Image: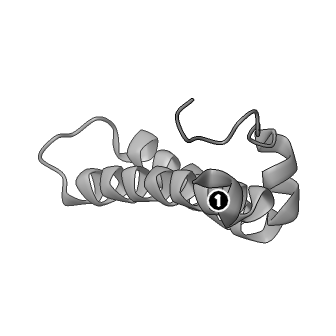
Amino acid sequence: MGSGRHGAARPPIGVLIQQDRVDFSLFASIIVIALAVMVLIGIDLASVAFWVAMILVLVSVALIVRRLNRLSREELGDDELL
């Protein structure tokens, strides 16, 4: 058989978020504020504030995904991922 995790399942996302609630609440607040700015100025593609808010949303989502991956690796242990 090939190498792999051999049945090691990733922990549920809710469990991972519970471990680091402060970081995820900060990411969520950044996304909410950026979306509020986007709604308040309207979908004005010529506005600098719209594009800055869009970048903040995309960066926050990327950071959330990276943080979830890191927490799941820590939960499983490095030896089980090989």
The x, y position of residue 43, in whole percent, is 28, 35
In this rendering, position of residue 27 left or right of residue 50: right
Residue name at image x 71 percent, y 36 percent: 6
Residue name at image x 74 percent, y 41 percent: 10
Q: Nearer the viewer, residue 46 or 67?
A: 67
Residue name at image x 43 percent, y 51 percent: 57
Q: What residue would you read off at disc 1?
A: 29
Query: Mark 1 falls on what kind of element?
Result: helix
In this rendering, position of residue 77 left or right of residue 40: right
Residue 67 occupies which quadrant of the picture?
bottom right
- Dot 1 crowding, Cα within 10 Å, few <14, some 14–19, many 20+: few
Residue 70 occupies which quadrant of the picture?
bottom right
The x, y position of residue 49, in whole percent, is 28, 59
Q: Nearer the viewer, residue 60 or 73?
A: 73
The x, y position of residue 69, in whole percent, is 59, 54
In this rendering, position of residue 52 left or right of residue 17: left
Residue 33 seen by the camera: no
Identified by mark 1, the residue type is Ser
The x, y position of residue 75, in whole percent, is 79, 59
Q: Nearer the viewer, residue 27 or 14?
A: 14
Instruction: Reply above or below: 15 against 59.
Output: above
